[in-house]
Each structure stands twice: as structure tokens, then as C-alpha cells.
Amino acid sequence: MYSIISLSLFAIGTTVAAIAAARPMGEELWWLLAIGALIIVAGIFVNRIALREAASKAAAAEGGLDMSQVTALINGLPGKCREILGKIDASPEFSEEVFKAVDTISQEDLFNIVENRSVLAYSLGAKVFPVLFGEFAEGERLFNRTWSALCDKHIEEARVSLTAAVEFFEKVSAEITNISSQKP
């Protein structure tokens, strides 16, 4: 739908601009040229929406996740990590249950977010995505450090790393929620 609208706007804008450029001598039709240019710019913006929508559909068709699913995974990370921190605080000894919970998040949530990062890239754009995903990558690195510390049964190091990871995941979650609430 958006692609048809964008193509129509391009065609109309180009036609209007061409008419203004082919004006008879002595007539000032600069305003018509400006209108044609504005219509073309509107077509560009509508085309960007169409491309984002197409990328999301393509990812879903390939068995990937769409933007709302990736956002839900990101928004769920801080709570899941806080839950694991609660288990670590409740029992300062190594727990297989805690290790399995961390391993599950790593294999499912983090894996799915990273594998579907193209959906985020298309939806967020070139200015926002690198910054947001950089923050996410820092949280992921700290989360992986948590996993590694648990493998070596270093509970305190795991707690410190997971606490830091939660901070990054909370930043990303808050930012993506803010961005999503601003989009129409």
C-alpha cells in the first residue's frame, strides 16, 4: 500500500515540477516547482515507511521475528535478569538452577535478538540503531561474562556482571519503549 502511494507521489511531484520548469516566458511559477518538490519529498518519506514494512515482513517470512517481538524480548530482559539476581542473593552458593536460567536466556532471548537485529536496523534507522544496539551489545557482553563466571562457579563475579548487564538492558528497554511510543 505504501509503495503505491510513494510511487504516485513521485510521479505527481515530478509532473508538477516539470510543468513548472516548462513555463512560458515571463510567467513566474516558482511556487508550482516548490509544490512539486514537496510532493517528491513526501514520496521519499512514504517510501521509507514502505521499505521498513517490507523488511519486517521479509524477516517474518524467513521465520524471523518482527519488530514487536524483538521489542518484547528486549523489554523482558531486565526483569528476567533481576529475577536471576534475586536467586543469587537468596543463595550465595553456586546453583545449577541459576546457571540454567542464564544459559536459557543466552540461548533463546539474546540469540533471537541478535539474529533479528536487521529488523531493528530497518525500523530504527541509521542514526538510532548503532547507538541503541551498542548499548545492547555491552549488556550482552556483561551477560556472557555472567555465564562464564557461573561456569567457573565465581558467584560474586557473576552477580557484579549481571548487575551491570541489567543497567544496560534497562537503558535499551527504556529507549526502545520511548521510540516505539513516538511512532505512529
Image (cartoon, rainbow, N blue to C red):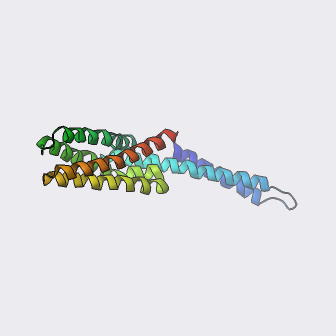
The residue lying furthest to the bottom in this view is 25
Q: Quadrant of residue 24?
A: bottom right
Q: Is residue 122 visible?
A: yes
Which is nearer the eye, 15 or 45?
Answer: 45
Residue occupying the point 88% across, 60% down: 26
Q: Is residue 96 left or right of residue 140?
A: left
**Image location of residue 86, percent across then percent down:** 23, 38
Residue occupying the point 60% across, 50% down: 43
Which is nearer the eye, 21 or 156?
Answer: 156
Q: Quadrant of residue 66?
A: top left
Q: Is residue 154 left or right of residue 45?
A: left
Q: Is residue 34 left or right of residue 183?
A: right
**Image location of residue 163, percent across then percent down:** 29, 47
Residue occupying the point 44% across, 52% down: 122
Which is nearer the eye, 126 or 74?
Answer: 74
Residue occupying the point 17% across, 42% down: 98
Number of marks in picture: 0
Q: Is residue 155 above or below residue 83?
A: below
The residue lying furthest to the right in this view is 26
Q: Is residue 108 left or right of residue 6?
A: left
**Image location of residue 37, percent across then percent down:** 68, 55
Q: Quadrant of residue 133?
A: bottom left
Q: Is residue 112 visible?
A: no
Which is nearer the eye, 70 or 33?
Answer: 70
**Image location of residue 73, percent across then percent down:** 32, 42
